Image (tube, grey):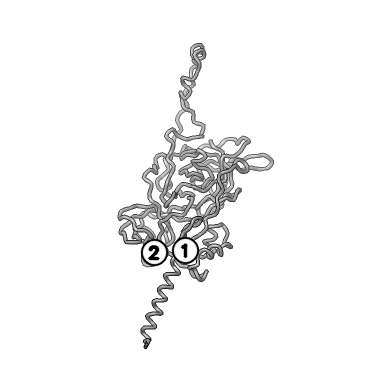
Amino acid sequence: MKITTSGIRTVVAGLAILTLFAASAPAAERPGFETYVVRSGDTLSKISGRVFGDVKRWREILKENPQVTNANHIYPGDTLLVPVPERAAPAGGAGGLVAGEGAAAGVSGGGSETFAAPAATGDQGAGVSVPGANAGTETGAEAGTTAAEPEPPAAPARAVAVVSPALYRSAGFIADRLPAIAIVASQDDRILLGTDDAAIVNQPIPSGTRFTVVRAERRIFHPVTHKDLGWLIRILGSAEVTCRGERTSTVALRAMNAGATVGDFLLPIDPNDVLEQNTLADKAQPGCISAGACDGMIVAFNEGRLILGEQEFAYIDRGTAAGVRPGQRFTIYREVAPEGRITVGELQVLRAGVQTSTALITTSVQEVQVGYLLRAR
């Protein structure tokens, strides 16, 4: 049989295409792992730093992805399986801390965004008394023989300010897992995408569906217990599906407050996320902190920052499982030896997940740091 030069070239080209396809295909998903989409500038070391908080553990990721034959050859849009750190069940820790499971607001199941609905009766745990709450509980003798004391005039209601939509939408949150919908290709191979740019996502989605565009910054580990709390999710803007394909969809980016890139994610917009319920009381200096266990801790800031001030976002290790609701306020303080406590400021919860919450620092008398403690007001 005679084999022509052109035939050999065709076979070699075909093998090259198959090799390229095999290199970009992820390993089969399995329990204990989640899919990470490589974005521009990623290396296995950087991904390891986001997943484990340790850049030296990149070999663990390489081991689980046999389709990657060279650790230096990963490209934007490639999908990798990354281990999910084990999470302990909630348990009491030093100073009354709880090691959360990491089931935070923002991602549940298939990656849909969920936010805890604000309590209908106002702030919980903030010391709000309800007039007449004990009516009808006195005994007949007490009710009939005790003269009613004249009630003091009611204190004037404190002014409140609604958080601006732009501020609220950019707050971000801690999520228990990575979202399922990811940007896998960009318009004209651009590295950064802004408002009105187009992108390709990895799922077929009906045209007109709207999403929030987010970035998974890194995993957050509790400063004291070192338990995994989930992924810190940063909100970049919004997107709308313009074309549905068989296996992918095209989206147009809208109202971007930061550039998106391949490897960023999309979350469905939650219609029950009511901005008007998240109001901030006017600022007040926090009072003294009595002895006792804390009610939570600041565990992370956005963009890897080390210190924050007023009108900036913090993430705390308490959520709806601990009775935290949007609108609840906490005093921020730090412990000093021996047995002393210094108030630093105040924050108010904007979004409450199961084990973590997103809050806005409303007052600070000095820089706020990760690890500072909280006391419910």
Image quadrant assignment for residue 164: top left
Give residue 113's mark: none
**Of callouts 2 and 1, the N-terminal one:** 1
Q: Could you say which is closer to the camera, residue 155 or residue 237?
A: 237
Residue farthest along the front direction in this orientation = 1
Q: Residue at x 49, y 31 (%)?
A: 128
What percent of the width, then of the height, locates residue 252? 34, 58
Q: Could you say which is closer to the camera, residue 40 or residue 341?
A: 40
Q: Which SS class for mark 2?
A: strand
What percent of the width, then of the height, locates residue 372? 58, 45
Q: Can residue 362 be seen by looking at this rendering?
A: no
Within-10-Å neighbours for mark 2: few <14, some 14–19, many 20+: many
Q: Image height check: is 146 above or below 129?
A: above
What percent of the width, then of the height, locates residue 169? 42, 48
Q: Residue at x 49, y 49 (%)?
A: 174
| Amino acid of disc 1 | Ala
Callout 2 touching callout 1 (CB < 8 Å)? no
Please tell me whether mark 2 or mark 1 is closer to you in this view. 1
Q: Residue at x 49, y 70 (%)?
A: 73
Residue on which disc 1 sits: 27
Within-10-Å neighbours for mark 1: few <14, some 14–19, many 20+: some
